[in-house]
Amino acid sequence: MIISLISLLTILIIGFLVVRYYPAFGGKPAQEKVQSSSQYSQDSFQNSVPTSMDTSLSSTVSMFRDLLIRNPNRKPHEDLPRVDFPSFQHPYPVTNVTWFGHSASMIEIDGKRLLLDPMFGKTPSPIPWFGGKRYSKDLPFQLEELPSIDAVIFSHDHYDHLDYGTIKKLKNRVKQFFVPIGVGSHLERWGIDPLHITELDWWDKLEWNGLTLVCTPARHFSGRSLNDRNASLWCSWCIIGKSSRIFFSGDSGYGSHFKEIGREYGPFDLSLMECGQYDPRWAPIHMLPEETVQAHIDVQGNCLLPVHWGAFTLSFHDWTDPIERVTKKANEMGILVTTPKIGETFLVEEGAYPDSKWWL
């Protein structure tokens, strides 16, 4: 009995120390900072409409059942085709976009180089040897090859978007970080100078180096540890330049906020919309692919770039389901959709968008 109690106490102490001091978990935001947000109430950030994941007994049992069922199509059977990123010196006068898998993307617009949710780690987990591995064994480039990055923009603090190892390698190459309120605390703990971090609330608009950046709503949640659920905000982004307007959804369930964003800041030349890692049981926080197309229509997008797929398995669907369903619905609705390979760059203003079915 005594040995069992000592063992249990030891485990609890180790767990507490890991959560408290392991840097990958990030930091806690200052209360005066988060309490200044109109999205913050009842000691946490809130969505603008009631949003929940189904945690009923039947739902929990069904998810355990799905975890036990082996579906060989949840991951690709071989390394994904990708384009070896030829050069970071793209023609600045022309807006161009490169997708690196999942939500990680690079935008070059009006002479500025931006990274969106640059998660370049091997697994979306605080402990690298746990969690599903990245489909592609290698990235189209080495992080050490990255030139100076004008800005990194994050949508929220989940591990598949904000990666400790990536930030440690990127931090000396980035001039400015733009994040929703509270996310800056993670970056500060990881050694980023607070002067290089700008935190925004929903509908905050910022003029920066010739670009207009707007932090806009999303329908999701946040958290990196056992005790920080919704301690920081989540968001989408509008990136508006002289000749191009781009929308990035971040992670979001479908909702009326997309039409609000479209009315206020649309139309957009390109929308990067999440379309993967969905399930009917958590549809309020992750859109189904058909909803992705509707959200693109709501924000008044021209071309749709489906993201949040093609890198990790975080749900139960086949790994190709997101892109097959979203392109099918887009075709039915007459929506222009682009499907670049991982690492493939395309020009937004030229209208020649990649559309191969490379996943087949």
Image (cartoon, rainbow, N blue to C red):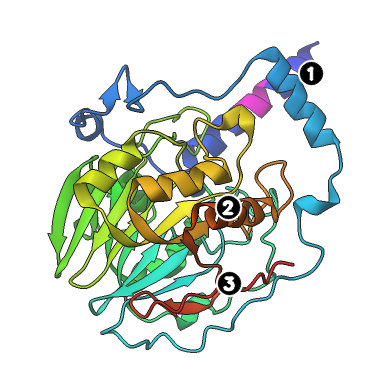
Residue occupying image coordinates x 65% and y 45%: 314
Please state the extent of the stretch shown in magenta in the rendering. Answer: 9-14
What's the residue type where badge 3 is placed?
Answer: Ile
Q: Cα distance, mark 2 to mark 3? A: 18 Å
Within 10 angstroms of label 2, few (less than 14), some, or many (20 or more) residues? many
Q: Amino acid at mark 2?
A: Val
Q: Secondary structure at mark 2?
A: helix
Label 1 amino acid? Answer: Ile
Q: Name the residue carrying label 3.
A: 342
Is 57 drawn above or below residue 160 in the view shown? above
| Magenta stretch holds residue 203 | no
Q: Position of residue 94 (x, y in %)?
A: 30, 82
Q: Which residue is mark 1?
A: 3
Give the secondary structure at mark 3. Answer: loop
> Which image quadrant for residue 83?
bottom right
Query: Is residue 162 at least partly visible in the picture?
Result: no
Of residues 110 and 302, the one nearer the viewer is 302
Q: Tag 3 or tag 1, which sits nearer the N-term?
A: 1
- The CA distance from mark 1 to mark 3 is 53 Å
Q: Earlier in the sequence, mark 2 or mark 3?
A: 2
